[in-house]
């Protein structure tokens, strides 16, 4: 059975991320951000949303692993910040419905959502510059980089919250991530 752990970055929806994975038949649990990465055994990692970068603990260490990583909101920002991208304050601020345009319909995480989907997102902070090796995979009128990916490195991020009911086709994002993890696991076996 595929095992994907959710690293808890203290977001209000972290439990919903775990439930979305569990509902897909995945072995999953929420793990503290303070847990050393080498103590986490998984086929994939979800870096949850959260309030700020001050409490991410050992979460950045998961980027050096050999399993796919999905960053959601703060999790995506953490990926960008750690890999020399840039994160800044968004112009739009708090939670709202946003129409997101998928700009890479070949992307294994969000490509199936093309050409656009409606999501629930916070833009208090957002990725303002992609890290090297990453492509922008989604955009919107309020945020240039709504999603990003470096499939070769197994790193993916979405600014929005696929785990909440307000997001259309959010389950599909998790299904796609499970498929990415299963494919990577088969390659390692």
Image (tube, rainbow, N blue to C red):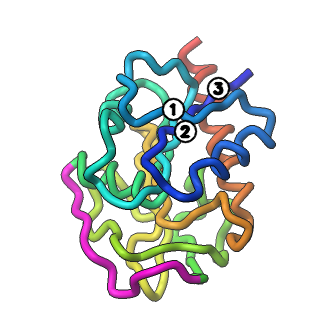
Give the label on residue 6, or none. 2
* Up-down relation of residue 100 to residue 26 (above or below): below
| Residue topped by disc 1 | 31
The secondary structure making up most of the magenta span is: strand
Q: Position of residue 166 (x, y in %)?
A: 70, 73
- Residue at 37% from the left image edge and 75% from the top image edge: 124
Q: Looking at the rendering, in which quadrant would you find the C terminus?
A: top right
Q: Looking at the rendering, in which quadrant would you find the N terminus?
A: top right
Of the pair 94 and 161, the residue shown nearer to us: 94
- Mark 1–mark 3 Cα distance, whole angstroms, equals 12 Å
Q: Nearer the viewer, mark 3 or mark 2?
A: 2
- Mark 3–mark 2 Cα distance, whole angstroms, equals 10 Å
| Residue topped by disc 3 | 3
Instruction: State which quadrant residue 106 falls in.
Output: bottom right
Q: Position of residue 82 (x, y in %)?
A: 24, 46
Q: Which tag, 1 or 2, sits closer to the chain's start?
A: 2
The reply to whether discs 1 and 3 touch (Cβ–Cβ < 8 Å) is no
Whether residue 89 appears in magenta in the rendering, the answer is yes
Query: Tag 3's secondary structure?
Result: strand
- Mark 1–mark 2 Cα distance, whole angstroms, equals 6 Å
Task: Describe residue 16's horizontal placement relative to residue 6 as left or right.
Answer: right
Q: For label 2, count other residues whose C-alpha is less than 10 Å away and answer few (under 14), some (14-19) or many (20+).
A: many
- Residue at 80% from the left image edge and 42% from the top image edge: 23
The furthest residue to the left: 84
The furthest residue to the top: 189
Task: Describe residue 90's horizontal placement relative to residue 120 as left or right.
Answer: left
Q: Position of residue 145 (x, y in %)?
A: 39, 70
- Residue at 52% from the left image edge and 71% from the top image edge: 103
The reply to whether discs 1 and 2 touch (Cβ–Cβ < 8 Å) is yes
Numbered range of the magenta stretch: 84-96
- Residue at 49% from the left image edge and 49% from the top image edge: 48
Query: Tag 2's secondary structure?
Result: strand
């Amino acid at each position: 059975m595929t095992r994907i752990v959710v690293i808890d970055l203290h977001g209000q929806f972290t439990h919903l991320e775990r439930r979305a994975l569990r509902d897909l038949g995945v072995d999953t649990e929420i793990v503290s951000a303070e847990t050393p990465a080498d103590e986490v055994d998984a086929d994939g990692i979800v870096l949850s949303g959260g309030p700020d970068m001050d409490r991410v603990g050992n979460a950045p260490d998961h980027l050096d692993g050999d399993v796919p990583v999905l960053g959601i909101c703060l999790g995506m920002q953490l990926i960008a910040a750690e890999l020399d991208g840039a994160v800044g304050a968004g112009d739009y601020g708090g939670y709202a419905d946003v129409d997101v345009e998928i700009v890479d319909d070949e992307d294994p995480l969000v490509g199936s959502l093309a050409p656009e989907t409606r999501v629930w997102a916070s833009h208090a902070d957002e990725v303002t510059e992609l890290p090297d090796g990453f492509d922008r995979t989604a955009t919107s009128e309020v945020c240039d980089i709504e999603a990003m990916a470096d499939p070769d490195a197994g790193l993916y991020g979405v600014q929005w919250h696929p785990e909440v009911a307000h997001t259309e086709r959010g389950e599909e994002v998790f299904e796609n991530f499970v498929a990415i993890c299963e494919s990577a696991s088969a390659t390692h076996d």
